[in-house]
Image: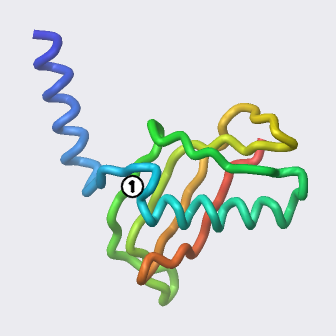
C-alpha cells in the first residue's frame, strides 16, 4: 500500500510540475551551462578550478516563455560543487536559462 501511495504521489507531482526531461552529464544543455558557468565564476575568482554538477539534483524543464523579448527554451535547476584550488565544499544551487539554438542566456549560482 505504501509503495502505491509513493508511486501515485510521484506521478501526480510529475504531471503538476510540467515537462521534465531525462538528463545525462553529456547532455548538450548541461555541458553548455557548466562551461559558461565555470567561465563566469572564474572571472570573479581565479582560484576556481572546476565545476561539478550533481546530476542527481538536476531538473530540466522545457519552456516557452520570454524575458523581455528574449525567448527562453529550457530552464535547468540543480546543485553544483565549485572546486577552489582543488578542494570542493558544500554544493551551491544554480539556475541556467537556455535560449534558441542551445545558447546559454544566464547561469546563476547562489552565494553562501
Using a 10 Å C-alpha cutoff, classify the residue at mark 1 as few (fewer than 14 neighbours), some (14 to 19) or many (20 or more). Answer: some
Residue 35 picture quarter: bottom right
Q: Position of residue 56 (x, y in %)?
A: 45, 36
The residue lying furthest to the bottom in this view is: 69
Q: From the viewer's side, name the closer residue of 7 and 100.
A: 100
Residue at point 52%, 61% (across, down): 31
| Left or right: residue 65 compared with residue 40 | left
Which residue position holds label 1? 60
Q: How is the image coloured?
A: rainbow
Residue at point 23%, 43% (across, down): 14
| Left or right: residue 13 compared with residue 30 | left
| Left or right: residue 41 compared with residue 20 | right
Q: Is residue 85 above or below residue 26?
A: above
Residue at point 40%, 67% (across, down): 74
| Left or right: residue 49 compared with residue 18 | right
Q: Position of residue 16 (x, y in %)?
A: 23, 47
Q: Is residue 104 above or below residue 14?
A: below
Q: Is residue 20 above or below residue 79?
A: below
Q: Is residue 34 above or below residue 32?
A: above
- Helix, strand or loop under label 1: strand
Q: Quadrant of the C terminus?
A: top right
The residue lying furthest to the top in this view is: 1
Q: Position of residue 3 (x, y in %)?
A: 15, 15
Q: Position of residue 13 (x, y in %)?
A: 24, 39
Amino acid at each position: 500500500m505504501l509503495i502505491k501511495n509513493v508511486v501515485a504521489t510521484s506521478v501526480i507531482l510529475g504531471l503538476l510540475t510540467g515537462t521534465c526531461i531525462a538528463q545525462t552529464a553529456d547532455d548538450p544543455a548541461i555541458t553548455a551551462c557548466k562551461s559558461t558557468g565555470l567561465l563566469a565564476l572564474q572571472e570573479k575568482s581565479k582560484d576556481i578550478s572546476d565545476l561539478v554538477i550533481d546530476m542527481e539534483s538536476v531538473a530540466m524543464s522545457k519552456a516557452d516563455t520570454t524575458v523581455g523579448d528574449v525567448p527562453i527554451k529550457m530552464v535547468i535547476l540543480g546543485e553544483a560543487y565549485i572546486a577552489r584550488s582543488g578542494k570542493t565544499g558544500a554544493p551551491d544551487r544554480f539556475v541556467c536559462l537556455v535560449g534558441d539554438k542551445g545558447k546559454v542566456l544566464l547561469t546563476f549560482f547562489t552565494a553562501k
